[in-house]
Image: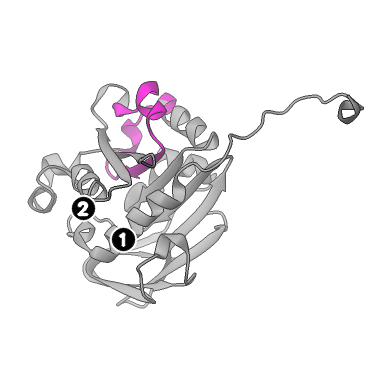
Amino acid sequence: MAKKIRVTVWGENAHEKVTKETQKFYPDGMHTFIADFLNKNDDIEAKTAVLDEPEHGLTEKALDNTDVLTWWGHIAHGEVNDAIVQRVYERVMSGMGIICLHSAHFSKIFTKLMGTTCNLKWREVGEREVLWVTRPGHEILRGIDDHFIIDQVEMYGEFFDIPEPDETILISSFEGGEVFRSGCTWRRGAGKVFYFRPGHETYPVFYNKGVQTVITNAVRWARPTGKNVSTCSNREMGWFLK
């Protein structure tokens, strides 16, 4: 039997305590909802971690048992300990995959990986979003046609201050006319990074089958597949003759 992909679904679990709409759609938390639909796949084993656990649930042992980390944050980015961010960063550089969802564009880990402000335009009026496929056949888009629709969302618009992605696989259009790079990939060290725009806390976005398909595929894409990055060293002349 093939080894399962070990996923840690991280959420700040803050809106779930104070926001009625979030409590309505995600009574056990968005992190639990995401882990539950991932665990419906035979090749994935997902567990959860949240902000108010010791070390935010991201202990050395927890990360030792994580192939792919998903990250959702919004109102508590500043409460994430810098030492834990550095720990996660080093794991990504060593090969762990990471998927940053929606407002995680402002998370400490995403901005550290990007090296930019990750700022963007936004508007929250519950408008329609169409996500258009720009890389047909990409592994993350398996099972997605040329587009899918989310009926009510918060708008994110360009300019999105990120480094040029290795791949832009989804572009969103909104009722107000804005567009946004909603599915972007990068390599950082030996690790793979995927940013996926959908996931607002007051709309049932994670119930959308297209959203679930993309996140599930992204877990498979982001899993470690090779060796860690080699360390730098001073190589002697003539080493190839020895």
Looking at the image, which residue sits at the far front?
Answer: 1
Residue 228 in sight in this render = yes
* Residue plotted at (37% across, 22% down): 61
Q: Which mark is residue 213?
A: 1
Using the image, determine if residue 232 lies above or below residue 188: above
Which quadrant of the rendered structure holds the C terminus?
Answer: top right
CA–CA distance in space, label 2 to label 1: 19 Å
Residue 71 falls inside the magenta stretch: yes
Q: Name the residue under label 2.
A: 201
* Residue plotted at (45% across, 42% down): 97
Q: What residue type is labelled 1?
A: Thr
Instruction: Name the image quarter holding residue 233.
Output: top right
Query: Residue 152: x and y, percent?
Result: 21, 68
Using the image, determine if residue 17 lies above or below residue 161: above
Which segment did they paint magenta?
Answer: 57-83
Question: 84 or 99: nearer the eye?
Answer: 99
Residue 160 falls inside the magenta stretch: no
Instruction: Name the image quarter holding residue 182.
Output: bottom left
Question: 19 or 171: nearer the eye?
Answer: 171
* Residue plotted at (25% across, 56% down): 200
Query: Residue 5: x and y, percent?
Result: 37, 41
Q: Which amino acid does label 2 sit on?
A: Glu
Which quadrant of the rendered structure holds the N terminus?
Answer: top left
Query: Residue 192: x and y, percent?
Result: 50, 46
Q: What element carries label 2?
A: loop
Please rate how many residues cluster around mark 2, counting C-alpha atoms within 10 Å: few if below 14, some from 14 to 19, many from 20. many
Lower position in the chain sequence, tag 2 or tag 1: 2
* Residue plotted at (43% across, 69% down): 171
